[in-house]
Amino acid sequence: MRTSRRAICALQRGASIPYQTRFIQTSARRQFEPVVVKAETPDPQLGSYPQLEGTSNQERRPKGWWDNQYRREFGETLHEEDEALNMFSPDLPHTNIEPRSALAQAGVAFAVLGGIMGLLAYTRPTPPAEKRSFPRDGLVNELGGWDVHKVSRLFSFLSISMKTE
């Protein structure tokens, strides 16, 4: 029943190549990964256009092409789903990087970035002007003095005055 539903969905969206999906269990969520399977029957919508194998251009060698950006030769026939198979399509899921290695690489990148930022903060030049200074101990009395507990005294005064009423 499940495969027939998938085949009907593939036909409804007009896919020329039937898709199989396999489940990948991850710690956060369940996701689908499409696997392209070679079609047994030719696509009637293509007409005389050649049916090419659906391989991503990301799997081709990086150098030696007429167009190095798209990795194709001059006059090469494009696949019917070229926009999904070219270099600007989503990256192929490679499993050659382990999570430990990815975390180590990210840690090194953040350490280098933090080191550069620390070095820039340490070697910051002094400003060309002198810092502002005020007379009479920095205007302590004019700005209210050094007493930190003025607010708590105010609240204690208010609480005492409220109790007497």
Image (spheres, helix red, strand yellow):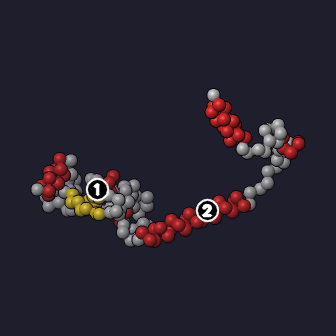
Badge number at residue 114: 2
Amino acid type of the residue tagged 2 in the rendering: Gly
Quadrant housing residue 79: bottom left
Answer whether residue 129 is visible to the viewer in this image: no
Above-or-below relation of 163 to 84: above
Q: Which residue is at the far top?
A: 165
Q: Residue at x 56, y 63 (%)?
A: 110
Residue 16 shows up from this direction: yes
Distance, label 2 to label 1, CA atoms, is 46 Å
Q: Where the C terminus falls, by quadrant?
A: top right
Q: Residue at x 65, y 60 (%)?
A: 117
Question: What residue do we see at 51% from left, 65% from top?
Answer: 106
Mark closer to the chain start, 2 or 1? 1
Mark 2, other Cα within 10 Å: few <14 / some 14–19 / many ≥20? few
Query: Is 97 on the left-hand or right-hand side of 109?
Result: left
Mark whose residue sits in front, 2 or 1: 2
Q: Residue at x 28, y 53 (%)?
A: 81
Residue 89: give x, y in percent of width and height. 36, 55
Q: Which mark is residue 123?
A: none
Q: Amino acid at mark 1?
A: His
Q: Which SS class for mark 2?
A: helix
Within 10 angstroms of label 1, few (less than 14), some, or many (20 or more) residues? some
Residue closer to the observer: 140 or 53:
140
Residues at circles 2 and 1 in contact by the CB criterion of under 8 Å: no
List the single residue furthest toward the right: 136
Residue bearing mark 1: 79
